[in-house]
Amino acid sequence: MTPRYDCRKAFAATLIELANADPRVVAVVNDSVGSSNLKEFAQRLPGRLINVGIAEQNLVGVAAGLANGGLIPFVCGASCFLTGRALEQVKVDLAYSRANVKLCGMSSGVAYGELGPTHHSIEDVAWTRAIANLTVIVPADPIETASALRVAAAFDGPVFLRLSRLPVPEVHPADYRFEIGRAAKLREGGDVTLIANGTMVCRALEAADLLHADGIAAAVINMSTVRPLDRRAIVEAAIAGPIVTIEEHTVAGGLGGAVAEVVVENHPVRMRLLGIPGEFAPTGSPEFLFEHFGLTPENIRKEAVRLLEETVGKREAHLGH
């Protein structure tokens, strides 16, 4: 069985590395040392971790002040609360002011499954990608998490990193280097393109294997930067054929919507947007929720086949006229 990893471990190890190399790097948490996997950071660098308690608006405001003082704050908290409770501060204190703060939304998506809709963070990409000046990144594996964290630390400006606690396999080679705004094509294919990010990338790759068994060549793109998008990669995919997007997020305003905006402006093509269909996700384990909403390799394969059949049918109907 392919090994799977909690990306929070790569996040924590890399943050310690960054802090050791740069005295400006600090962690700011909302009573979330354990859930952000920062216990070792706190032990090694006790003077570099600020705990504001369960007060997310203060969390972001304090981080903005630290950035104004020349530090590089990494703000760590459950993504559902970090974005939901402090969105005004993210917009005004960080993005509008271009504060050099790195927001780390932990346990995003449906990772807190059994805690229910209050803890599902399935709107955070839609909220954050709508804010000007805010870079939005959704890493797919521990290798990309570590690389994206290093890039975010070197980047001058606010960044939102959406991080999951769900174990995922490595999908990138060890020498992979993340770049803001550049997608990674993980598999070539000329029949259909699967565009995913975060925890859905490994599932898209598994779906591509299933499609290969059907005689269908599916390309797989990891669109880890949602803002700014790799528009060229999207247009090239649209020129090649239909597109399926897969995200652990509501389909309203997330990755699928972002890709569709580029497609409709540049090269309209049939699409299928897979995710949570504009409703509150129920209480249940993450795997139950993935099954419930069809975010499985088998269902991705089924929807890709259906989309190809619809595309061929529409083309034949057009030629018939």
Image: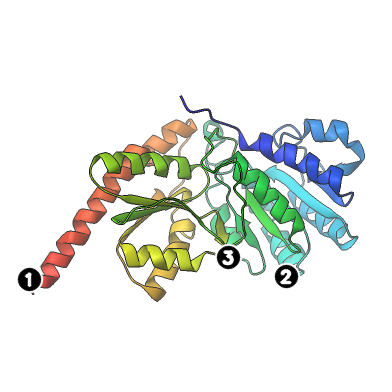
In the rendered image, which residue does mark 2 sit on? 96
The residue under label 2 is which amino acid type? Tyr
In the rendered image, which residue does mark 1 sit on? 320
Q: Which is nearer the eye, 275 or 231?
A: 231
Q: Earlier in the sequence, mark 3 or mark 2?
A: 2
What is the C-alpha distance between the residues marked 1 and 3? Answer: 41 Å
Q: Is residue 250 visible?
A: yes
User: In the image as oriented, which residue stretches furthest toward the left?
Assistant: 320
In the rendered image, which residue does mark 3 sit on? 228
Residue 42 image offset from top left, x and y in percent: 84, 34
The residue under label 1 is which amino acid type? Gly
| Dot in front, 2 or 1 | 1
Count of labels in the image: 3
Q: Is residue 277 visible?
A: no
What is the C-alpha distance between the residues marked 2 and 1? Answer: 54 Å
Circle 1 packing at 10 Å, graded few (<14), some (14-19), many (20+), is few
